Amino acid sequence: MIRIDNLTIRFGHGQRPVVRDVNLAIDSGTAFGLVGESGCGKSTVLRALSGLNANYDGRIALNGEALDRQRGRPFYRRVQMVFQDPYGSLHPRKTIRSQLQEPLRNQGLDRNAIDVNTVLRSVGLDPGLSYRFPHQLSGGQRQRVAIARALMLNPDVLLLDEPTSALDVSVQAEILNLLQDLRKERGLTYLLVSHDLAVVSHMCSRVAIMEAGEIVEEVDIEALRRGAVEHPYSQRLLRASRMYGRG
Ligand SMILES: Nc1ncnc2c1ncn2[C@@H]1O[C@H](COP(=O)(O)OP(=O)(O)OP(=O)(O)O)[C@@H](O)[C@H]1O
């Protein structure tokens, strides 16, 4: 359903590519993980998919329809992103309600086209919280708001960029479980970026391992759990994660 062919991204003419010749096919309704150490290019792949960066070589398609970089809006509406730091992605001086209505306004829709209260309840939040400002919420509540915001336009795909790494461990588990439930209820497709193999192993059915801008290996999650990876970099990543009890 999501298909990425020969994606190459460089920042600046003549620069070495930060993402090189990436090919991925992600089935509809599944959760796919993209792992690799800091700076390997994971977020750069997500930004191209979300439309935040239209400057790339290669082809990105959703349900067989190639992303048109000039007129990408309908595509981007179906693909929404959730960032690591919900504080950073929410406006400090706007109420939660107003920020949830923003995606509707940006698409030229009536702000009541989708009921904010229903979406808030679907992420486990009391609609009464919507009159607060971001600093009046806990970190976990803020991340629930960020997820609610991503759901406002009823997307098919969520791009999750380290969605729990800024949270306490207990809150992390709650948010991951919420994301699992939402995927099943809504038939969502996830592309989840994480440096944490435990998170990917909990959430995803398949995973691609990225090193220095390239996908070195793609495996089913059972293979990752068994340690049945072939590439030396994947083996190193797995060993390191087990050393810290996160594999
Ligand atoms: N706008 C930009 N201009 C120039 N270089 C950039 C830009 N954005 C990212 N980079 C570089 O591209 C490389 C990949 O960055 P990216 O954020 O995709 O990595 P990542 O794997 O997501 O890392 P992390 O896990 O730390 O978020 C890094 O070397 C980064 O410095």
Image (cartoon, rainbow, N blue to C red):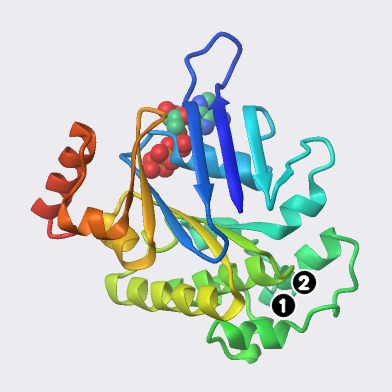
Left or right of 107 in this view: 122:
left
Task: Say what secondary structure mark 2 lies in.
Answer: helix
Which residue is located at x 57 percent, y 69 percent?
A: 147
Residue 30 in the image: x percent, y percent?
Answer: 49, 63
Query: In this view of the protein, which residue sits in the foreground, 107 or 134?
Result: 107
Which residue is located at x 62 percent, y 28 percent?
A: 58
Q: Which residue is mark 2?
A: 101
Left or right of 79 in this view: 142:
left
Residue 220 in the image: x percent, y percent?
Answer: 33, 55
Splitting the image into 4 quarters, where does residue 208 fall? top left
Which residue is located at x 54 percent, y 45 percent?
A: 46
- Does ligand 1 reach within 8 Å of label 2's beta carbon? no
The image quadrant where one finds the N terminus is bottom right
Splitting the image into 4 quarters, where does residue 47 fall? top right
Mark 2, Cα crowd under 10 Å, few <14 / some 14-19 / many 20+, is: many
Task: Say what secondary structure mark 1 lies in.
Answer: helix
Residue 97 - label: 1
Residue 67 in the image: x percent, y percent?
Answer: 73, 41
Count the marks: how many? 2
Q: Which amino acid lies under the numbered mark 2 shown in the image of this protein?
A: Gln
Which residue is located at x 55 percent, y 28 percent?
A: 6
